[in-house]
Image (tube, rainbow, N blue to C red):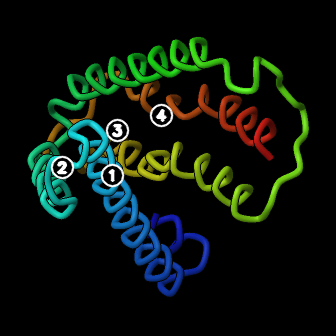
Amino acid sequence: MADAGEVMAGPIGREIFGTAQILFLVFIMGSHILTFSIMMNTVTSHGTCTIVFGVVGLIVCLVFTMPRTLHRVSYMAIVSFMSIVAAVMITMVGVGVERPGNGKVDVTVQTNFSSAFLAVTNIIFAYAGKSLNFCSLLWVKFGLCAGEPPPSNPGSTAGSPLPDLPDLLLSWCWCA
């Protein structure tokens, strides 16, 4: 992001965008650790202190992010894909069983600011990883990730954000 800021606004843009990117990633990491703590509290019926679960979540996140290379990212992507599919299936079954609102769906609803803000931030955090596309594109073009050579098929990685664009736009229009 800092490089994009430098192209748009020179050295000052590089510093502003770089600082914003670091802050954004720190808050994303905090969100992951908080979500882990809430999940563990729910699963264990508050079996221990939330701070302990936060520290455990921090250690888990630290261990899985320690290798700073893209060498095994495809294996992590498979696990990530399977966990997302499992979460979606569990949610679909849960909603099907519970039938909230007796199956009635309203196209528009009256809402307050906090609910609308939460809906928008859910969309933003769901696609938070897209801000790291600059890193993957630089890796493809220059092999800038821990001395690894760039892949032999750069078009697939360079084009990977394109299929997500309609999904982003539909999600935004649906929830806005």
For the residues carrying marks 2 and 3, which lies nearer the camera in this image? Answer: 2
The residue tagged 4 is 158
How far apart are the two marked residues, 2 and 3, measured between alpha carbons?
26 Å
Q: Nearer the viewer, residue 33 or 70?
A: 33
Q: Are marks 3 and 4 in contact (CB under 8 Å)?
A: yes
Up/down of 86 relative to 124, above or below: above
Q: Secondary structure at mark 1?
A: helix
Say few, some or many: other residues with alpha carbon within 10 Å of mark 3 (under 14 / 14 to 19 / 20 or more). Answer: many
Up/down of 159 relative to 37, above or below: above
Q: Indicate the position of residue 92 as horizontal and vertical percent values.
A: 55, 16
Up/down of 86 relative to 35, above or below: above
Which mark identifies residue 61?
A: 2
Q: Secondary structure at mark 3?
A: helix
Looking at the image, tell me whether mark 2 or mark 1 is earlier in sequence order: 1
Q: Indicate the position of residue 120 as horizontal and vertical percent values.
A: 67, 53
Q: Secondary structure at mark 4?
A: helix
For the residues carrying marks 3 and 1, which lies nearer the camera in this image? Answer: 1
Q: Are marks 4 and 1 in contact (CB under 8 Å)?
A: no
Which mark identifies residue 140?
A: 3
Q: Are marks 2 and 3 in contact (CB under 8 Å)?
A: no
